[in-house]
Image (cartoon, rainbow, N blue to C red):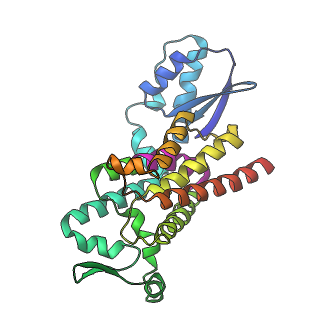
Amino acid sequence: MHPVMRLPPDADTQALRKALWRYRIGHRITVEDDGQVLWIADPGQRDALLALVARWQQGDPLELAEHASPGQTPALFATLKQLPVTVALVAISLVIFALMGVFGDLMVVALTIVPIGIVGGELSYGSLVDTLASGQVWRLLSPAFLHFGWMHLIFNLMWVWYFGRQVEALQGGRTLLLLVVLAGVLANLAQYATGTVLFGGMSGVVYALLGHVWLMSRRVPGSGFFVPQMLVVFMLGWMVFTMTDMAGLVGFGNVANEAHLGGLVVGLVTGWYYSVRRLRS
């Protein structure tokens, strides 16, 4: 999100909001001490937004100006172009999930944190030290792209899109990529430390993004980051619930809890670090 302008604190923006969404202009309006701040997701739509605001302020019908005609690049396509890392995370996860459907266990074995196999009817696996020494460094991160069902995939990618695009839009693709790699690796190592080798999913990254976005929104309210408090309560409550015996009784016992916790810690650390930098500047 990018700040555009301040509106009067008592202004009724309902009609403006409806017009902006009608023309697919991604935006958000936050309430600050000295007024309401209007933010835009795609800077390329700034002129169209300003034209609508001008008409709204003058009481004119809220229609798009000529420069925002149907010949303009679609808002969705423009947004995707500005979020290459977020889009890549979603796309890679979808491709790997499709390849798992084609190649089955061969794809899983290629991406687990250490090579695994079946010997004498039991799961056999090597050590992480030997795996890394052999040059298979990608295995530190690759389990994050393994998903073992549609619900697992959709749930994770939905939150990757929700949180990831905020980080990429407001702090850049490099910051998001750094956060994903750091959170993915440390979450996988945390889960491996429990003695588990067959695990996967983007959940550790999701909780890192949650912690990062939440802390940035709390410590730097004008940064543009936003996450509903009830969503934070729900996701933290879910993490705690899956750590209890009750989760196993209702079919949620096989959850990478340590990866969730490890990812959350990473996100809180990065959120604190970047919020301190922002406050100092």
Residue drawn at point x = 71 percent, y = 43 percent: 219
Residue under the point 39% across and 48% down: 247
127 sits left or right of 98 in the view: right
The quadrant in which residue 98 appears is: bottom left
Residue sticking out furthest to the top:
59
Look at the picture and state if 127 lies above or below 240.
Answer: below
Residue 257 part of the magenta segment: no
In the image, residue 232 above or below residue 92: above
Q: Quadrant of the N terminus?
A: top right
**Residues shaded magenta:** 158-172
Tally the marks. Answer: 0
Q: Is residue 73 visible?
A: no
Q: Position of residue 107 (x, y in %)?
A: 27, 71
Q: Residue at x 40, y 56 (%)?
A: 255
Q: Position of residue 190 (x, y in %)?
A: 52, 67
Judging depth in this view, the residue of 265 and 168 nearest the camera is 265
Coordinates of residue 160 in the picture (x, y in percent):
45, 50
- Estimate the x, y position of residue 231 in percent, counting from the top left: 51, 37
Look at the image and say whether residue 163 sits in the magenta stretch.
yes
At a point 43% along the width and 89% down the height, the residue shown is: 134
In the rendered image, the vertical position of residue 28 relative to residue 18, given as above or below: below
